[in-house]
Image (cartoon, helix red, strand yellow):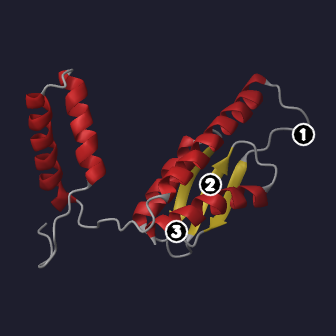
Amino acid sequence: MKPAAGTVRRLPPVLVVGLLALWLLLNRSMSLETVVLGLVVSLGVAWASSGLRPLQPTLRRTYLAGVLLAFVLRDIVRSNFNVARVVLGWRRGTELKSGFVKVPLALKEPHGLAVLAGIVTSTPGTVWVSHDAEASELTLHVLDLTDEAAWIAWVKEPYERLLLEIFE
């Protein structure tokens, strides 16, 4: 697929840096020659593969990515402890009830949805099941479903809010 007329091929800096880091790790060297060759290869691969992704993300407020990462790490740690309590039988109170939650989304940008899918799925105890683009609704499976409104709020605040600010 050819890029549209007047379209400029942009090189994603994260891809270039990631490829360069991988090159340096695989070569186990930081010599000038290795770094320069790795940079040339990284730029070449990023340029050659840019035509495979005709839809490029437009990032508005990239500084919020650090805040988003902090929330993700916090929730991953919390969820690991909660899932461990369930698996080890240390959970007190009511019987375990898993289920599906329908979350209405305002987020429509494909890259933002992909990031949200990664966040939800990497958090133990939750799985992104489906996304209905027409209804703009996410179906989420939750291991320990006690309060559906709390899970909707967990997706919408802070994740959807931050992703809207970053991508839309």
Instruction: Estimate the spatial distance between the alpha carbons at disc 2 and disc 1, rounded to whole Å.
Output: 21 Å
Query: Mark on residue 19?
Result: none
Judge whether residue 132 can be spotted in this image: no
Mark toward the start of the polypeptide (1 vs 3): 1
Residue type at mark 3 is Leu
> In screen coordinates, is 41 left or right of 21?
left
Instruction: Estimate the spatial distance between the alpha carbons at disc 1 and disc 3, rounded to whole Å.
Output: 36 Å
Instruction: Name the residue at 58% across, 41% down.
Output: 73
Q: Nearer the viewer, mark 1 or mark 3?
A: 3
Q: Nearer the viewer, mark 2 or mark 3?
A: 3
List x then y, in percent, for residue 43. Answer: 14, 48
Residue at the disc numbered 2 = 140
Residue at the disc numbered 3 = 164
Q: Is residue 155 above or below residue 142?
A: below
List x then y, in percent, for residue 118. Answer: 49, 49
Task: Rate crowding at label 3 as few (under 14), some (14 to 19) or many (20 or more) other CA atoms within 10 Å.
Answer: some
Residue type at mark 1 is Thr
List x then y, in percent, for residue 36. Answer: 10, 37
List x then y, in percent, for residue 20. Answer: 21, 38
Number of callouts in the render? Answer: 3
Please state which of residues 45 and 140 is positioned toward the viewer in this rendering.
45
Q: Is residue 61 above or below residue 33?
A: below
Quadrant the N terminus occupies: bottom left
Judge whether residue 133 can be spotted in this image: yes
Q: Circle 1 — which element?
A: loop
Mark toward the start of the polypeptide (2 vs 3): 2
Point out the residue furthest to the right here: 93
> In screen coordinates, is 52 left or right of 88?
left
Residue at the disc numbered 1 = 94
Residue type at mark 2 is Leu
